[in-house]
Every structure is written in structure tokens, then in C-alpha cells.
Amino acid sequence: MEQIDIKNLNDLQGAAKIFLRKFDKPGIFAFYGELGAGKTTFIQAICQELDVQDPVTSPTFSLINEYRTIHDTIVYHFDFYRIESVNEVYDLGYEEYFFSDQYCFIEWPEKVEMLLPERSTRIKIEVLTNNARRLIISEDKT
Amino acid sequence: MGVLILGIESSCDDTSASVVKDGYVLSNVMASQEVHQRYGGVVPELASRAHQQNIIPVVDYAMSSAGIGIEKLSAVAFTRGPGLLGSLLVGTSFSKGLALSRNIPLIEVNHLQAHILAHFIAQEGKEDDQPKFPFLCLLVSGGHTQLVLVNDYLDMKIIGRTIDDAAGEAFDKCAKVLGLRYPGGPKMDKLAATGDAEAFTFSKPSLPDLNYSFSGLKTSFLYFIRDQLKNNANFIQDRKNDLAASLQKTIIDILMDKLIVASRNTGITQIGIAGGVAANSGLRTTLFNEAKYRNWKIFIPDFNYSTDNAAMVAITGYYKYLAKDFTKQTIVPDARLNI
């Protein structure tokens, strides 16, 4: 268990740098946090550090956004907010993305908990007072 | 004979097929309970596999309602992107197969461009009621918020876009906070009609360019309500209509502010609105009031052609057909396709 504190928006990019120093290899990253906690915002900051060229926006409607980096790698950005049953995720062909060896960032992973592969990293975003945020990171070592 | 285009849309949730003849819609069919009943099935759930179950019934129904045989088609147009890869693949593969088997041209269509060209779906007696080039188009839906400068049917440029959430998403997510079921946007519009839009103020973004942001508004709305609930546990119940009206006004103001700047910067007064949020009555009222004041001319396609639909794909296919802008069989879908 590890945590990164973000005092305010000015801290955001620095936090993304710290995050990526720790996770410098692609993998599955599940972001937990209530509406407005800043899941999309933090993923935007990480994507900027990964040199994503495309605009990083909320995938709530599109379900999956894919972005290309200047290093010609791909970043997948998921949002399972609208998903009602796990079958829908099977139908999306999620395996193709989850096992692509690219960075996969997932919002609202609660809906697909059972599909998260082993060795996924879970990040809980807690809202503190004065707009501060705390990231609580737990790695699945199994 | 005329030019007969079959359009196929499968970029996200809905499978749709449409037949357009010389710019007029002969049929525009969406996968629905009714279509599936004809085939003895039920509407499958969201996403890609559903499109596979939908596509044959939907195309077949579109062809038979249009009253034409498949041998009469001049070309087949399909959404190449942006959208979900798995969903796009279904429409793309189907269209390629059909074009190949009929030996007719294949036409790729950009979903965003199609939303904008929905303005040119011809309707009997209303042929002149279409924007003149160049015009500004505000594309607002659950998934998109973009300001587009449209120079010609096939020449357009995005001049502003959301940097986080779409406007429709702001409606839907704030509606959730009020306890309305997804998609809550239309319900919000209904509540807002009887609420006081000046009751509360929420923060607006201050982006220097023509870009939009709705993520901050969502958070500001959420925290405001959380604070109020501490004093009054029935706050949402007591003030639901006022909250809806005030929030709706804020979203509309944000949309309008950039539209006004874009119009001022370009000198363009022909304004088109596309996407599902065009159905929002508050937005329509505000637009028509501004139009009177600013001498704008406003164009909004019928609701059926504003939300995701295949008629807009077929009409785009029609204009590409006239321009002989055809696609090779080697084409693949592009989830990130841009204008």
C-alpha cells in the first residue's frame, strides 16, 4: 500500500510523474473514486506524461477511448459507468485491450471487478478537504 | 433512376440503417424491439456483439421500408469512426461484403461529419431550410461537444472541443446526483422547465480559446449539493426543479459563450446545431432568443436525425458519391478518426 498526496491542481502533474516513475511499464490500472473525485483528470495528467497526442476526454459515452503517443504506443482509457452487466464487457471484446501489453486506465472498475486480470493495480482517489486528493495505491502481487 | 445510398451506422450503442434517394430519406431504421420482433428475437444489450445480431434485420427492414431491392443501390456508406472498434468492425465488414457482392462503390463516413451533414437531409417543401456555407455548427451530444467551421459538405474544421466531459455527459452525471436514472439529461430538461434558473450559480470554466470544459461544473454542482444536504436532508427534493433549471442554464451559458465568440470572430451568422442535446428545450429557447438579438439564422435537424442515426451516414455518403469520393476494400475502421 502506497499513497500519493495531491494538495491542489498545481500538484497534479508532479503526482503523475511520481506515479509513472513507479509504474514505468504498461499494465492495468483501475481507478476508484466517487463522481467528481478526479479520475479523468488524473488520467489526463498521466497521459500527458506518457506523451499522448490525442485529446484525452471522458469515455463515459464512448466506453473506450484509445490514444496514440508520440512513441507510437497506444493508451486505452475505459469507463464502465454505463455498463450494467459483465456480459456487456465480454461483448466489447475487453480481452483484446486488457491483454494488449499497453497502458489500460479504467474508470468505474467496480462494475467489472471479476474481469480485472491478476497483477492489476488499484488506485483509490480520496477527496480530502480544500480540494486536495489522496491516491491510495495497492498492487496485486498474485 | 436517381442515386440510392444505403447508410450504415454502428459506432456505439445503436445499429441503424437508412436508404436515401437523391438526398431524401426513404427509410431510417434503428435496432428496436419492433425490428427484432419481426425476426423473433429481443434487443440485445449494449455494444459490439449486439451489432452483429442487429445488422441483418436492421438493413433488411430499411430496404423493405424504402421499397427498393438491393440491386437498385448506387453505393453503400458506413461509419468508419470515431467509435468503438468492435462496433465499427461490424458495420465496416458488412458494408464491404455488400459492396463487393453487388459490385457498387463503398464509401467511408466520419461519424462527426455525418452529424453535421444531417442538416442537408432534404425534406419535401423545406429544401431551402438548410444552412448556407460557410456556417458554424455546434455538435452537442452525450459523447461529443465540438464547434465546427463548415466550409462545404466535405470541408470542415474543428475550432473548439471539450477538453474533458461532453455537455450531454454533464447533464447525465448531474442528473444522477439528483437521483435521476441514466440518461438523465431529458428528465433534467423537464424539471428545469418549472424551476428558477437564477436560484443557484455554479462555476463556469474560463478557457481562453474556443474549447469547452464541463468537468469542473460537475464537481461544483456535486459539492454544492453535498454542503446543502448537511443543513437540509431534503434539499434535493425541496429544490429539484430549481437545481435542474440553474444547472441547465449554466451548461447552456457555457455552450453559448463560445458560440457567440466564434460567430463574432468569423463573422458567420448561419448557425447549425447537431447531436442529441439539440433536443434540449432550454438550449433551443436560448438559441432562438440570441438569434433574434444577433441576427443569426438557426438550423436544427429533426430529432431523429440529431441523435445517432444512419440517415446522416447515408446523406454524407450521397455527397461523397456526387464527389466520387469512394473507398477501397482494404479500408479498416478507425476508432480515433477525426475531422
Image (cartoon, coloured by chain):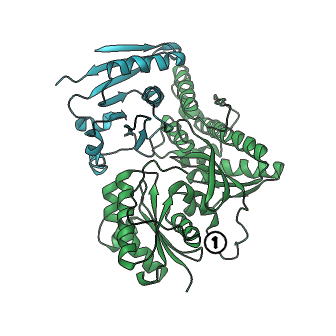
Q: Which residue is mark 1?
A: B122
Q: Position of residue B76 (x, y in %)?
A: 45, 71
Residue B309: x and y, percent? 50, 62
Which tint is chain B? green
Extreme-front residue of the structure: A71
Q: Nearer the viewer, residue B295 or B104?
A: B104
| Residue drawn at point x = 44 percent, y = 41 percent | A60
The percent position of residue B39, horizontal first and vertical second, equals 31, 73
Asked if residue B302 can be seen in this view, the reply is: no
**Residue at image location 66% in from the left, 42% down from the top:** B255
Task: Quadrant for the N terminus of chain B, please.
Answer: bottom right
Q: Colour of chain A?
A: cyan
Specify the quadrant of the image occupied by residue B126: bottom right
* Tag 1: amino acid: Ala
Q: Residue at x 31, y 49 (%)?
A: A92
Q: Secondary structure at mark 1?
A: loop
Judge the density around disc 1: few (<14), some (14-19), many (≥20) Cα neighbours within 10 Å.
some
Pinpoint the chain carrying mark 1.
B
Quarter of the view holding residue A10: top right
Q: Is residue B293 above or below residue B68?
A: above
Position of residue B130 measured from the top left corner of the image (x, y, whole percent)? 70, 65
Between residue B37 and residue A73, name the one nearer to us.
A73
- Tell which of B281 and A124 is nearer to you: A124
B174 over B332 or under it: above or below: above
Q: Is residue A64 left or right of residue B272?
A: left
A30 to B287, vertically: above or below:
above
